[in-house]
Image (cartoon, helix red, strand yellow):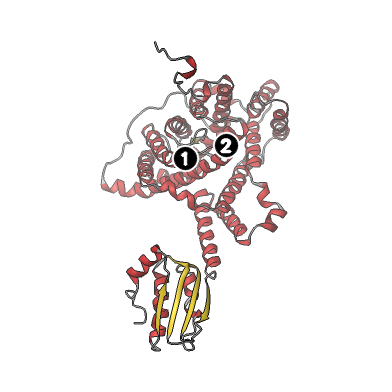
Amino acid sequence: MSMLPAAVRPRLSRPSWLSPKVFRTEVLAGLVVALALIPEAISFSILAGVDPRVGLFASFTMAVTIAICGGRPAMISAATGAVALVVAPLAKKYGLDHLVAAVILGGAIQVLLAALGVAKLMRFIPRSVMVGFVNALAILIFAAQMPHLLGVPWLVYPLVAVALAIMVGLPRLTRAVPAPLVAIVVLTLITVATHAAVPTVGDEGALPDSLPTLGLPQIPWTLDTLTLIAPYALGIALVGLMESLMTAKLVDDITDTPSSKTRESWGQGVANIVTGLFGGMGGCAMIGQTMINVKASGARTRLSTFLAGVFLLILVVALGDVVAVIPMAALVAVMVIVAVSTFDWHSVAPATLRRMPYGETVVMLATVATTLATHNLAVGVVVGVLTAMVIFARRVAHLVEVTSVLDPDGGTRIYSVHGELFFASSNDLVGQFDYAGDPDTVVIDMTHAHVWDASSVAALDAITTKYATRGKTVEIIELNKPSARIHDTLAGQLGVGH
């Protein structure tokens, strides 16, 4: 027994979810997310061309595994539409076993990319792309609800209205219970009690009645098979990582807490490997369900993610008959609230648009437009980043300024270069010198400039060559150490003037 006073004994840190209040929040949040996952998983299974059980089991294994291995607490990973779009052609032509093999290989590629530090590339994604990502996501979530609101019995509309009223009004009275859960329970009780003939979860597809089993896909383990599935596996890996890391960054901002993007990257890989071994269709982070978990339900720990997967399995296997009678109107209303709360309304306010630089708005719109056109958030982000790079290059291409003074004796012209010299900006540099009119000695002062690439060294060589052909000498001075290193290495080696 330690003789130290109680006040100075080392205390073991206990998980925050052991607090009764936090525990209740996490459990209820996990239940709400599980209910919201069911129709989504079934829909994505149909999109991928596989049995609904494949998507439901994938959502269970992804959520449970990422809760343990992931780097972003409270983020939900499950079967997703983006991955379904990637694997659909493979499943249609070659069947489920080839799809599962591609998922396992895709997970292995994600682990490899994590080891290579791909998560560090997130720092190069501009804020305007993030805003476009969020806005496009909100629009896609809202648009995905339209099939459940068109061509349906008229009773669906008042039910949706009641659910929306509950989710808007209840948080003003109490946050003890997640408003989405209350809305789902109330609408289910109403439809069951009144025998209302409205679409239910059961109408979306058959629910499984057994547990998933562990096993390897039945495929020829040959080089031809690897060649066949490799492109799909790479697509799964890249799309999954892109969406997961973007979603993790969004949750970081919402919760004001950091997360390990590298751990999240390999965690997604491990989750896809596990999912494939259990015959699932693979997946990645789900922004809609993550927003339900984090924003609508207030979850903050791994427990909610873990329980979302566990509750999902219990609901569809043990309580399938109960889940089947939940009206789709309740889940549609939940997703509508998620879409509205996810959209960055400030970004499209007239006052914001007037203040925002033109290029920032263009990048945001390019991200949104591409995402909506392709229904692929990863493609939208890539186009947004490329657009931002082009606009940035155009903006800085003309920021190099050259000033000059004549030495008092009139024998030397001193040029001072200000700005960043790279392939875009260095093109303007050559034309800012008076080769014919300058005296025999020219000094180029680089104190306020930085040389970034071979194009800039080539531009300086071209300037020196132009003066040399006129019998004049040039001295380049005050290069900083990185600039001097690249200049000394490449000067005179680039074939300028030949």
Q: Is residue 113 left or right of residue 153?
A: left
Give the mark nearest the N terminus, 2 or 1: 2
Query: For the residue carrying disc 2, how many other residues have a C-alpha within 10 Å: few (<14), some (14-19), or many (20+)?
Result: some
Question: Considering the image in quadrants, where does the N terminus appear?
Answer: top left
Query: At 55% from the left edge and 21% from the top edge, which residue is drawn?
Result: 19
Residue 143 rendering spot, x and y as whole percentages: 62, 45
**Percent from the top left, x then y, of residue 223?**
26, 47
The reply to whether residue 376 is visible in this rendering is no
Residue lying furthest front: 409
Q: Quadrant of residue 478?
A: bottom left
Q: Position of residue 158 (x, y in %)?
A: 73, 33
Q: Quadrant of residue 184?
A: top right
Q: Which residue is mark 2?
A: 255
Relative to residue 310, is residue 360 depicted above or below? Answer: below
- In this rendering, would 195 be left or right of 90? right
Does dot 1 land on a helix, a strand or a loop? Answer: strand
Q: CA distance from mark 2 to mark 1?
A: 20 Å
Q: Which residue is mark 1?
A: 284
Q: Which quadrant of the figure contains the C terminus? A: bottom left
- Outermost residue on the left side: it is 222
**Residue 376, position in %: x, y?**
52, 49
- Kind of residue at badge 1: Cys
